[in-house]
Amino acid sequence: MSEGQVSTEELPLRMSEGFEAWLAAADASLVFALPPAKLVFVGLDDGGGIAVFERTFDKAMGIAHDAERDAIYVGTRREIWRLQNALAPGEQTPGGHDRLYVPMRRSSTGYVNIHDLGVQDDGRVVMVNTRFGCLAEMSRTHSFKPVWWPPFLPGPAPNDRCHLNGLAMRHGVPDAVTTVSTSTEVDGWRAHRRDGGAIIDVASGEVICHGLSMPHSPRWHGDDLWVANAGTGELGRVDTERGRFEPVAALPGFARGLCFVGDHAVVGTSKPRHGDIYSGLALDDRLSAKGWPPRLGVFVVDLRSGEVVEWLQVDGAAREIFEVIALPGVRRPAALGLTSDEITTHVRLAGAPA
Amino acid sequence: MSDAQWTQPVAPVTVGPGLVAVASLNATPSAGFVAWLRAAGASLVVSTGDKLLTIGVRDDQIAVSELRFDVVMGLAVSPDGSLLAASRWQLHELHDALAGSRGPGGEDRMLFNQVSHTTGFVGIRDVAVDRTGRVLFTTALCNGVATLTDRGDLDLVARPPFVSEAVVEERCHALGLGLDDGELAYLTAAAETDEAGGWLGMVADGGVVVDVRADKVLTRGLSLPCSPRVHGDRLYVTDGGTGELLHVDRGTGAASSVVTLPGIARGLAFIADRAVVGCSVPPDEGPYAALPVSLERPAEPRHGIAVVDVDAGRVEHTLTITGGSGEVHAVAVVEQAQLVGIRWQHIDAEGWFVLETTTG
């Protein structure tokens, strides 16, 4: 397979031959979070070549798009940022970007280990607060507002018992979550990484699928609930009737971060490292049996065949990708950063000449 | 309705006593200052250079808490007790986390920097919360008083009658805003001009007070007028460049001096019948070097705040700030709180969380 080099010094990327054409046909851009520091936007330039844009956020993890208001939420180490598109429909920046996401609001949460984010039908954000083992909303006056927690836990407390990490939204409300275990011991999830993982239905509080290995990123797509069974490196459907996980695709890394574009899934993969929480899992066995090194990137899976059809790989020192989202109808997004003068000189005055 | 609960983490709590003797500056009260503040039952908030200070009383001593920004200018305490503070490109909301309980250092309020709105560097020198709860602020860059839209854009709600358009271009250098019964009533600007950069050569005596509701200039000939405040039906304005606290007749616009301070007078708030006025040492360079108080420097220019008896026209108490401090930009009052802690939560207080719980 020939590869396109799109490297920058900080973010060396390689991609499959057809990645750009796929992105063009998908009529979408991708945004992924690369902790500890980067939020990466992937689009196409006027010539159809890949256009990568990255910004620095401290431990960017969960990302969610409020399509109605065209705002992106990013969960970071201690806060949630709202990035609002500042361009009018059809407007472009001088650099040819068709979206300009500006960090317009910072909300403190404290260090709660924010994982997935979701946007509810009324626009309110719900976060997976992994440290406290709950779903929570942002609060203007408080650190956060717990709204739900697994029934086997006594309540929100800062001791990460079960490693609640993923959130599937459906019809604008939280529908299902993933946990690495159903442990009620403080930090107890670490002992259950191989097969203690569960999917819990939010409305009933019932475990609807168990025996998973560090499941992440549950997502509804059409009438199917999908999940990344990270510890085996598999993407699959959940048979919610029988409570079974049905693998569809095998990926070359710790599968986490998932979105859908048409009949394709886009899955993030991270590199396990000997001795860390991603290692010692079935994924390690499968990759070493085939002699494959784990890879960091996003992989495009054809949902009908289960085949990986395209990929974008991140080389260099980065080890983890947390989340990937698609921005439908967006060709080449950009964002302002927090560390340059741009954020100080960006002034939008209603009614003023541009 | 919500209440607050403190949640203590399993990790060792890294938060020390909430209030510290500030090492980066010295705050020296005059003999009666602490007794006055204690009797008033309030605390002060002061923005000075890159520091936001709260000034209160603990064990009959002055107690200062400090929070750093790149620069901090306009301030307001909202009717709900939250503190609004403008830094270089953000407007921050600091909310009380204690809900009536006591903080780890004996605080009766603990303000966390909870939400920050991006404004861009628009020069926010004065902030107020109107009767409807809308946050209003002056923007020097946009020549008037603005608020934030849901999307985060600036919406100019008032500008002086002599500024012909809503524009991102500094013309008159809007400085202060004042409410009357919770409604925007006055704004001040450094110059009566509609030209880009026009204010720069006019700071010595080009300043105006604008009656927003009448859409007319009320008072002319001022020098860097700041902080218009209606107190007891009377309008007071600090005339920064002369160091004076002025009383302005709301009908005729006639200004009369209440008291003169040894420096640039800027920042004004009232506790009962006393005015608390900020005072800064005049600069030797920059546009403010042309101010009267810079050209004819007081014998002993001071940096700090003065407590003024406006009826008697005299300074009663002072707090002198020395070392590691910039200009005093604004002053605000936290009522019924003697010890107010302030925290930039994600740096200082990661060991503490306040959970919002719905109680009905």
Image (tube, rainbow, N blue to C red):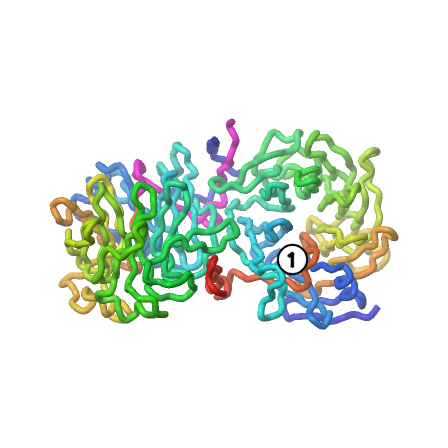
What range of the chain is rendered magenta? B333-360
- The amino acid marked with disc number 1 is Leu
Image position of B258 with respect to B201: above or below: above
Residue B173 position in % (x across, y down) = 33, 63
> Which quarter of the figure has residue B134?
top left
Residue at 28%, 64% (x, y): give it: B191
Foreground pick, A157 / A74: A74
Residue A11 x %, y %? 65, 66
- Nearest the camera: A13 or A240? A240
Q: Is residue B299 visible?
A: yes
Which residue is found at the position 41% from the left and 59% from the top? B88
Q: Chain of mark 1?
A: A
Magenta stretch: includes residue B351:
yes
B239 to the left or right of A285: left
As drawn, which residue projects farthest toward the right? A305
**Left of A153 or right of it: where is B108?**
left
Mark 1, residue position: A34
Q: Is residue A167 above or below residue A23?
A: above
Quarter holding the N terminus of chain A is bottom right
Mark 1 secondary-structure assignment: strand
**From the viewer's perspective, is A92 left or right of B210?**
right
Question: Horizontal and vertical percent for residue B115?
Answer: 47, 47
**Mark 1, other Cα within 10 Å: few <14 / some 14–19 / many ≥20:** many
Q: Is A315 on the left or on the right of B282, as rendered? A: right
